[in-house]
Image (tube, rainbow, N blue to C red):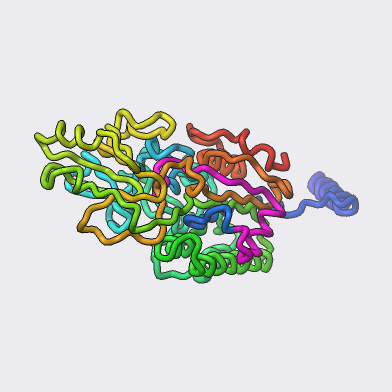
Amino acid sequence: MMFRKLAAAAALAIALGSASGLAAAPPKPAPLTLLISIDAFRPDYLTRGVTPNLSGLAAGGAFAEMRPSFPSKTFPNHYTLVTGRRPDENGIVANNMRDEAHPGVTFAMSNREAVKDGTWWDQAQPIWVTAEQAGMITAPIYWPGSEADYHGQHAHYTSTFDVKTNSQARVDMDLAVLDKPPAERPRFMTLYFDAVDTAGHHSGPDSPELGAAAAEVDAAIGQLLAGLKARGVVANIVIVSDHGMAPLSPDRRVFIDDILTAGTYTTLDLGPIGTVYPAAGHEADVEKALLAPREHMQCWRKADIPARFHYGKNPRVAPLFCLPETGWVVTTHKSRPPEKGDHGYDNFSPEMRATFIANGPAFRHGVTLKTFDNVDVYPLLAKLLGVTPQPNDGNLADLAAALTK
């Protein structure tokens, strides 16, 4: 009898809940946080009339010119964006670097074994690991650092980078993950495009080829937006670039082999930055020659790099570091002439400015923010995901005006 009374009461409660519109319903999934990088996409590219989708997202959400971290290179800034730590603190101090803990090994984007070795990336925890620790599924596809474990932890979904995969196919990769059953779909995922960067290097930032690359990526963004809509996926979309691009000329070169004697040094990076390693016994001579005042380039001991760069304390930074004027390169007579564009320069240079666009339910419409440092993106991602951020150099207050609450 008691069981029948309880069953009847439960049935009545369900009926009353349905009648009042309070019936239990499946909870709405939390919005997807989608971080998109368009490598080397300068803010002024939005004004060239070839990016209707990106321009629409910027106009309907939040937009800012963003200051990259120094050096304004690809791997250092991508890892800064997802850790909130500047390159000197996150350990990815350059695209090419050495570490005494890895004798005889040079980290480079082309060194696939090093790129997948988590010990190069373990000085700062990326946002996808924090999210995974909070019980979320993540898919940082093609993002620098995502192929490596972080102290044995890794993302649920990742993929080995393949430069031959075109922009449309990269969108298809992300949409395929969103076609998984609900319990297997990510809360955080990334998308990466390098077509604009490639065109900027090969043809220059003001070239028709760059305009075509920007249009290609914009079309892929349109494909992505249509795919999200067709799947009913609500997303907070954060679009960034890692740095800008400066035009180059064969007439703007500083030849390091005119400054230093052959056999007294080696270099690892040349171009918009120069990293120099004196040979044993030649430290004083190499320093004296490099540190002397000269036009179009300045060099420092790593300990003396100006504080505003937040750079030089990490053991992976070269003992001597040279920075040419924006648009100039440090090179050798044996090197090929420079390409039409490059980056890595002073992160306060206007040509190095990066792009920030945010659109989705978490963001207000029609907001233009003041220029901010790219370390601020990390605490924003943590807020969107509802996770406690790791210690970082960012300040969410810089982006508060863009948020709905």
Left or right: 404 in relation to 110: right
Q: x, y (%) of residue 338?
A: 33, 59
Q: Which residues are magenta?
A: 46-75
Q: x, y (%) of residue 285?
A: 15, 34
**One can see residue 234 in this view:** yes
Nearer to us in this view, 382 or 91: 91
How many marks do you count on the picture? 0
Nearer to us in this view, 229 or 262: 262
Q: At x 51% / y 69%, what residue is drawn?
A: 208
* Picture quadrant of residue 311: top left
Q: Is residue 181 above or below residue 297?
A: below
**One can see residue 189 in this view:** no
Q: x, y (%) of residue 365?
A: 73, 49
Left or right: 332 in relation to 190: left
* Picture quadrant of residue 247: bottom left
Q: At x 37% / y 36%, what residue is drawn?
A: 88
Q: At x 13% / y 40%, what residue is drawn?
A: 279
Nearer to us in this view, 218 or 378: 218
Q: Is residue 210 above or below residue 150?
A: below
User: Where does the C terminus fall, quadrant-wise?
Assistant: top right
Is residue 48 one of those drawn in magenta?
yes
Q: At x 53% / y 35%, what residue is drawn?
A: 394
Is residue 33 one of those drawn in magenta?
no
Q: x, y (%) of residue 391?
A: 48, 32
